[in-house]
Amino acid sequence: MSKNLVIVESPAKARTIERFLGKDYEVRSSFGHVRDLSKKQLGVDIEHGFKPNYEITPDKKKVVTDLKKSTKKAEKVWLASDEDREGEAIAWHLIKVLELNEERTNRIVFHEITQSAIEDAIKQPRTIDKNLVDAQQARRILDRLVGFELSPVLWRKVKPALSAGRVQSVAVRLIVEREKEIKNFKPTSSYKITALFDVKTDKGKGELAAELPKRFKTKEEAMAFLQKCQKASFTIEKIEKKPGKKSPAPPFTTSTLQQEASRKLGYPVSKTMTVAQQLYESGKITYMRTDSVNLSNMALANAKKEIMKQYGEQYSKTRKYSTKSKSAQEAHEAIRPTYLNHQTISGDDSQKRLYDLIWKRTIASQMADAQLERTNVTIGISTTDEKLSAKGEVIKFDGFLKVYMESSDDDEQDTPKGVLPPLTKGQVLDLKKMDAIQRFSQHPPRYTEASLVKKLEELGIGRPSTYAPIISTIQKRGYVTKEDRDGYPRKFEQISLSKERNINEETKTEKTGYEKNKMFPTDIGTVVNDFLMQYFQNIMDYNFTARVEEEFDEIAMGKKKWDEMIKEFYHPFHERVEETLEKSERAKGERFLGVDPKTGKNVYVKIGRYGPIAQIGDTESEEKPKFAGLRKNQSIETITLEEALELFKFPRTIGEYEDKELVVSIGRFGPYVRHDSKFYSLKKEDDPFTIEKDRAIELIEEKRERERKKTIRDFNDENGIKILKGRYGPYISMGRENYRIPKGKEAEKLTLEECKEIIEKSAKSGKGTKTTTKTAAKSNKSPAKTASKTKSTKSKTKSSSGGKTTGKSKTGSKSTSRKKTG
DNA sequence: CAGTGAGCGAGCTTCCGCTTGACTT
């Protein structure tokens, strides 16, 4: 039995630390926070000083019971969560939940996961920093108030089940505003002059590329310049050589790892984090959720050793990086390999590639600068004062570039500067070709997942542990989508001056506007953003988080009381919520497209209850208007009248098969064929406007074949009980519900009776694998359920559900118990 | 997974940050 119980946040960390501490110490983990504001209600008692109502998080119940058992056995409990706001709060919640006695409880923090650092920490126990805890409570409560008061406003004023929050709403704003900038962007064009010269060298022939630093606004000016050059001679006037250097980037943080993995490996943010988690859990890298660029002394020493061994002393340069952001807590190290002498690892391909990236970045950060020599050549033109310029770059010493070079987000790189041929001052050059090419200015780039994370980090919004979830939330809510866009052709002018000094004009075509994995706002995203911008500008302010962070810091320093800070924020905010509910119009993002030539009725597009729709006719008129949902790639902002009218051509009957009609239409999940009240999705290559009977039958038969392959046994039972083959092995299906087969039973040998029994049992226990689809909500016009009016509403819901929950399980209800996981 | 969209109006939805498995069909 251990005398001491140490509690940390992560089980992987617990394993490591246990090795250092020896048998007198048992190390367990809390798996992050164990307690949070009540999930169902507001969880904050506004009338009584914003008193928080904490509950043990459902999936932490077992953790808490286990920890409690361990504390009973231990003489001393050491709370070793991270040394930041959240970590301090975790420790405090643990004291409360585990009912720890202060006298035998110590709060400690590790600055490094090494034997000596841990022993040092044990020697310096302290008590809980309640001010820091209060700063966390203020953060938590503010976020809850904002999220749970703002979201219901959207349910009533835009669409049900939407959400808003301090972080996500600003993330969406960035994307919506960028899209608006792009939409309003008017590209301007100018003419860029490039020249290519033949140069004789010892080895034979070389080339020199040069360009005119200045650009011409018009074709006429460009033409005039080329005409001047027709009879010109070109002479080297100046050769300047300057030394230069490049320095390595600091080691990875969560956000820079996400960016580089996106640029270099093409990983979405979520994949980077999943793979990093795997590497962390198998002990190959340090903790992957960090904003610190700090490396431990041990890591610095090991990096040096590795660099000396592999590349030699001149490549080594020990560098201490410090985190710029003022909220830097240095609770963790940067993300680095645990063992820097392991250049490669075992694992799957993704793990190997991500590890390789981390290893290179870490090692490079401890390597010498690259030494360069930059050459600038000025070329005079005999017929004008304008000068051409050629640039070259030679690496004199590669330094860290031997291992790693950070990528950049810019699509368009400057023309690569290479080695120049040997040149001398006064040398006359032989023109091979000169071009004046029309170039267009670029709109600001759309965000990728990773560049959005970068921007959020710059604004101080979100934390390393939340970057990936933010990206997924705003996509799940339908505010933004990650998409590819095909480019479109664009014409440009080119004037060329040939070796023979003839001028030739051409109009050429290039592809532009191509996008890969970029973030686009949806119609819902735009409408919600505009609504929030109109009524809740303070929350949407890019500096809102920074401002409240300052106040949290004051609370942490004991200069301010947390409840006072919340009070000052809440009352004006709440008033605004009330006012908005009362006075604002429903935000539909409606756009009038024109008049339907067939019926003479007005055609609109707007946000309906289930998303963007087109509408023919007015709601006020006696005759009911007709509605049709927009296609996935269409948007309210860009759809034309003609495209909208096309949508009303469905449903289309295209023939009969097995005496049943074949009907083509477009539903929530895209175009489909309906036959015998079954649905068959159209493939990407099928066009719902033109698809014919034969192809539809093909699709039906394909699906039937798939179904047959999936079926292990079909009892032809009246309830439709079948045994099917799934991704996770065989299972029983009845109607729309699925049931797992208990262990030890063989799927092929199950009888109908046995299946019914399994279904029966599963229904009784209430959990298991039963899944049901909820029928869509019928309307959004629920009575006001926002915090203000809630007193009555809330107490009602409380009592009604309270009666049912006395038995402590919500299983009794046969209703739709849809399990919500991850 | 599935065909809606106004209107009766019950009872749903929602936040951010800290952590992993259990679960999926």
Image (cartoon, rainbow, N blue to C red):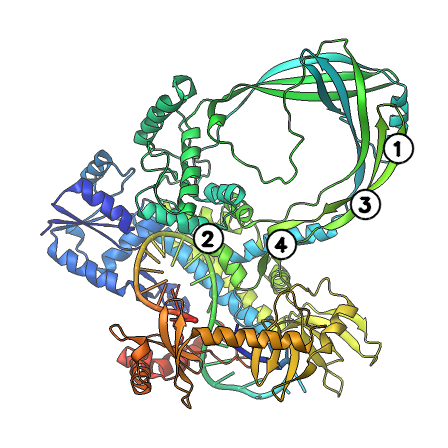
Structural distance between the alpha carbons of marks 3 and 2: 39 Å
Residue A557: where, in percent of width, then height? 37, 44
Judge left or right: residue A815 versus residue A22: right
Residue placed under numbered mark 3 in the picture: A491
Residue drawn 46% across the image and 39% down it:
A325
Mark nearer the viewer, 3 or 1: 1
Judge left or right: residue A271 versus residue A588: left
Does A275 sit above or below residue A620? above
The three-letter code of the residue at mark 1 reads Asn
Q: Which label's residue is closer to the chain start, 4 or 1? A: 4
Does A90 sit above or below residue A339? below
Q: Look at the numbered disc 1 and give the secondary structure of its residue.
A: strand
Q: Look at the numbered disc 2 and give the secondary structure of its residue.
A: helix
Q: Residue furthest left?
A: A1
The three-letter code of the residue at mark 4 reads Asp
Whether callout 3 and callout 2 share a subunit is answered yes
- Chain letter of disc 1 in the image: A
Residue placed under numbered mark 2 in the picture: A270
Q: In which quarter of the image is residue A416?
A: top right
Structural distance between the alpha carbons of marks 3 and 4: 22 Å
Q: Which label's residue is closer to the chain start, 1 or 2? A: 2
Residue A337: where, in percent of width, then height? 35, 37
- Chain letter of disc 2 in the image: A
Residue placed under numbered mark 4 in the picture: A484
Residue placed under numbered mark 1 in the picture: A504
Q: Look at the numbered disc 4 and give the secondary structure of its residue.
A: strand
The three-letter code of the residue at mark 3 reads Lys
